[in-house]
Amino acid sequence: MVTVEHELRGAARELMRTRDSEVLMSGPAGTGKSRSCMIKLHTAAMKHPGMSGLAVRKTARSLASSFTEEWEDLTKAELESGALKFFGGSQRKPAQYQYENGSTITLGGLDDPIKIMSTQRDMAYVQESTELTEDDWQSLVTRMRGKVMPYRQIIADCNPNHPKHFLKQRANEGKIKLLISVHEDNPRFFHPDGAMTADGMDYMPKLDSLTGVRYLRLRKGLWVAAEGSIYDGWDESHHLIDRFDIPDDWPRYWVVDFGWSHPFVCQWWAEDPDGRLFLYRELFMTGRLVEDHAKDILRQVTKATVRDDLLDRDELGPLDDIDKGYRTWTEPEPFEVITDHDAEGRATLEKYLGISTTPADKAVLEGIERVQARMKRQRDGKARIFLMRDSLVERDRELAEKKLPTCTAEEIPGYRWNPKDGPDKKERPVKEQDDGCDCMRYMVAHKDLGSADLNFLGWV
C-alpha cells in the first residue's frame, strides 16, 4: 500500500468529509479546486476495492487536455509502484485508470455519453462543471447507483459563472452542497499562517490585474453577470454546441482581426441552408507574424500528400506546396476571407494564403445589433448563431497564464458597454478583450447589414 500525505484546508478538507450526493466546489482561479476533487476521487478508489469512478468533462478532448497531467502528478507514486495502471481503451471499454484492488476511474466526455454512461457509478468527478447543461447533470445523477461505497456522490469544480446558471440555482435550492474555495486553501500560494509563498507572490498579482467580470469571478469568486453586458442573450447551454461533421455544400467564410500584442484572430464559419452561422475553428494567438498565421491557416485546411521533408521548402510554405500538389484541401475553400482594414496585414495575408480578402463592414453599433438579433431564439426555438466547442486550434499559453480570454467563447461574457458616453453620446463597447467579438461582428455584419429581416421572421 502506497501512502501519500496531502495538506487539505478549508473547502478541500470539508470536501473530504461530506457525503452529500451532489457537491460543487466553487471559487476563483488557483484555489486548488481540481486537485482537491482528484484527491477525493483517488482516495475513494484506494479505500473501497472495486469502486467504479468517473472523471468527466463536457467533451473528451477538453478532459484529456486538462485532467491527465494533474492526475498523473497526484498519483505518481501509485503509477510507479504498479498499484495503478492506465488502460487506453478498446471497442468494449473506454479509457480508464485501473487499480490493483479492482477499482477503476473511467475517463470521458458527455459529447459521447454512451461510452461512459452504461455502468453504474459510485463516484463521479465533473471538471469545469459550468460547461454542462442541466440535462447533462441529470444524466449523471441517474448513473450514481453503484453499490461498492457506503454512499454515492457527484463532486464538481468550477469558477463562478452567471448567477442564473442552473448549478447556482440548484445550490440555492439546497439540491447541491456548495463549498466555497479560497486562495488561502491552496498550500502552493499561501503558508498556513496566511503569508504568501513565492509562487503566490508571482501568481496573485496576475489575478489582481484582471478587470470587469473576469476580476469578480476569477479573483473574488463571485457569481456575477457582467455589468453592462452587450450580449446578455448569450447562453452557453444553447449557443455553445457539440461538434458535428459540416456538410461540404455549406458555404465557408474566414474572418480575420489582425494583432500582435492583442490576439490575431482567425475564425472559420459555415452557413447552413437556413442561414444559421456556425463557428467551427479558431486561431487566437499573440506574438506571431501574419505570414506565420497565414501558413498555419493553410495547414489547418490541407493535408500533405508527400513526405514531410519535401514540405515547406519555399518561402510561401504551404501555399507553394498546394501549387505543387504536395498538399490537398481537406474542406471546401472559403467563399470569402473577411478581414480588418489593416493594409499591410491584408497584403501579407493575401500573399501567403493566395486568396484575396474583403474588408470588413466595421459599423460597430449596427453590427452588434445584428449579432444580438441572431442570438435570440426564433420561432423554431433556435438561435441563428452558434459556436462549436473545442474550436480552438492552439491555446495561447501567455493569455492563459494571465487569465485572459483564449477564445471567443471566453470573451463574450465580459464584452460590455463603456459606462462613459462617447463624444456623440452613443454607447460604445469597452475596447479590451474584444478581438474575437470583433471577428464575430464582422461575420454577421457581412451577412446581415442591409437586410430588412432583422428579426429573422422567415426562419421557422
Image (spheres, helix red, strand yellow):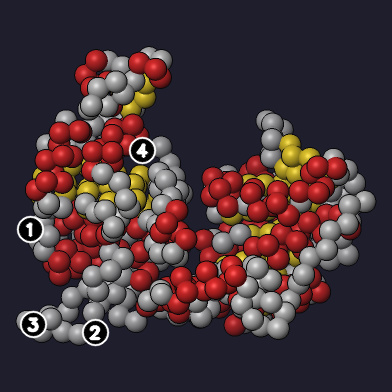
In the visual, does 280 lie left or right of 132?
A: left
Q: Amino acid at mark 3?
A: Pro
SS category of the residue bearing label 3: loop
Q: Which residue is mark 3?
A: 423
Q: Amino acid at mark 2?
A: Pro
Indicate which disc residue 246 carries: 4
Alpha carbon distance from label 1 to label 2: 29 Å
Residue 267 can be seen in this image: no
Q: Earlier in the sequence, mark 4 or mark 2?
A: 4
Indicate which disc residue 419 carries: 2
SS category of the residue bearing label 4: loop
Q: Earlier in the sequence, mark 4 or mark 1?
A: 4
Q: Earlier in the sequence, mark 3 or mark 4?
A: 4
* Residue 175 higher or lower than 87, as above or below: below
Alpha carbon distance from label 3 to label 4: 45 Å
* Residue 50 higher or lower than 82, as above or below: below
Q: Quadrant of residue 122?
A: bottom right
SS category of the residue bearing label 1: loop
Q: How many C-alpha atoms fall within 10 Å of the one at disc 1: few (<14), some, or many (≥20)? A: few
Q: Earlier in the sequence, mark 1 or mark 2?
A: 2
Alpha carbon distance from label 3 to label 2: 13 Å
